[in-house]
Amino acid sequence: MSQSDFQLPTADAVRAALKARRSALAAAWDAAPDSGGGLLLVPSGLALPIEGSDQPYAFRAHDDHYYLSGARAPAQVLVYDPAAAPGWILFSAVADQDDRVWHGGTEALEERAARLGFDAVSALEDLGPWLAGQAGRPAALLGSRDILERPIGYRLHPGDLDILAFDADWTALLQERVTAGRRVKDEVELAYMRAAAFATRAGHLRGIERARAGMTERALQVEIEYAFQRAGAERPAYASIAVAGARCAVLHATPGEQLLTEGDLVLVDAGAEVAGYDSDVTRTWPVGAAFTAEQRALYDLVLSVQQTAIDAVGPGVEYRDIHMQAALGIAEGLVDFGLLKGRAESLVERDAHALFFPHGVGHLIGLATHDVGGWAEGRTRSDRPGLKYLRIDLPLAAGHVVTIEPGIYMIPALLEDPELRHKHHDDVNWARADAMLAFGGIRIEDDVLVTAAGREVLTGAIPKTPAELEALRR
Ligand SMILES: [Mn+2]
């Protein structure tokens, strides 16, 4: 399937997927030892007012609430009662006259229930009376925990929740089950992710085609985000990075008034969001019509490491091995290039590659750009410089979506650090490194779906070979 070939899911498909997600969680809950009729509460979170203003900050429902309910409004609570029929109830606010005057009408509760696959949706006002009937029952709490601190926002009285016995073990068990479910994308989620990839492609193409020397980073960002939204995005998935020159080495730089300059590289790390689902793509290309020889040598290295890493993605593969293989590839390439000295294996053992590649090769992506569930049970984050920013350590499985995003950067904060220079005195050609301190950096990033047969690059239609990029820049 090509990237332009996506279709948004039908209302029926959405409803069926939501019911399947809730059924899977209910089955796990019912089968859990000693779950003995406990309740599950999953609040969406409350909007945060902007002080001194009559508007709230842009609201984002808790991802677990949205994943299970399909609803994204503030002040909603999804509950599951294994002892009742219907087991699942969504408590949701009904617009009053004031709401209708200022924000327009909202759908009736019956319509909401039909759209989201609930037998019934209850008014938020009924949450308090419903809770009063649950005295003494054990309960698990997923989603936003703000209901504990700000019950009034959910039309509850302080103390209304005290009649439940929240259980940390059950909460942990159900959290793990939801997290495991969210790792494996269903067809509805993949349809949204393909739509996000489509909009992301439109944005990157417009950026590559419109960038000119003398333009500000900020203007480039606006061009990219304009095209995202024209192509169906709700909003950028995360704060877009669109920077040039030495600033390409600032990993999370914010685009500003800096000008694109002939001879510089531009690094764009930006993705579109559709129905809450994210895309996360990085491309690096020249301000001018062609890469310089030095830029091209390092670009070819990053691209070849990225392609090798993408080719390694498949079910059962340990993500950490893909990261270590990329680290080794970067170390080998930097030895050939003349920035590192010695054997690649021992350079990686000493984390010398992390001077130039200080982040992980990627992460899970879905409702969150850095999605939940990065660690297999019993594994924890390493504190080694070459591994501490790796956000996943688990075997991949069909349905996971991961990013693959190796990079090489000249980061003064690392390369001018006296301790690191001492530690890696013999590992680095320091004269060469010092001469390249203003080089910036290169990252190439795509979103890769693990399939039973191997992989599908969801963002593969966004140009990245030097020939494609230079043709677009001319
Ligand atoms: Mn990323």
Image (spheres, rainbow, N blue to C red):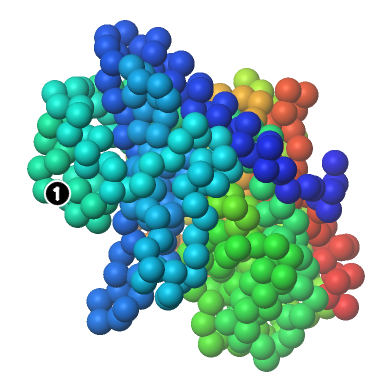
Q: Is residue 256 above or below residue 378?
A: below
Q: Is residue 98 above or below residue 271?
A: below
Q: Specify the amino acid type for callout 1.
A: His
At which x and y percent is residue 420?
38, 55
Question: Does residue 358 appear left or right of residue 187 in this picture?
Answer: left
Q: Nearer the viewer, residue 127 or 67?
A: 127
Q: Which residue does the image show at 36% across and 47% down from the upper left?
A: 123
Q: Which residue does the image show at 12% across and 36% down from the upper left?
A: 162
At which x and y percent is residue 21?
53, 29
Q: Which residue does the image show at 58% across and 43% down from the upper left?
A: 115
Quadrant of residue 95 within the rendered picture: bottom left
Q: Nearer the viewer, residue 355 or 39?
A: 39
Q: Nearer the viewer, residue 188 or 109?
A: 109
Image quadrant in which the C terminus is located: bottom right
Q: Nearer the viewer, residue 230 or 15?
A: 15
Residue named by callout 1: 157
Question: Does residue 371 appear left or right of residue 269 in this picture?
Answer: left
At which x and y percent is residue 384?
39, 40
Residue 400, visible in the rendered structure: no
Quadrant of residue 242 within the rendered picture: bottom right
Q: Residues within 10 Å of mark 1 (few under 14, many from 20)?
A: few
At which x and y percent is residue 316?
62, 20
Quadrant of residue 259 within the rendered picture: bottom right
Q: Which residue does the image show at 67% across and 69% down from the upper left?
A: 229
Say what secondary structure mark 1 lies in: loop
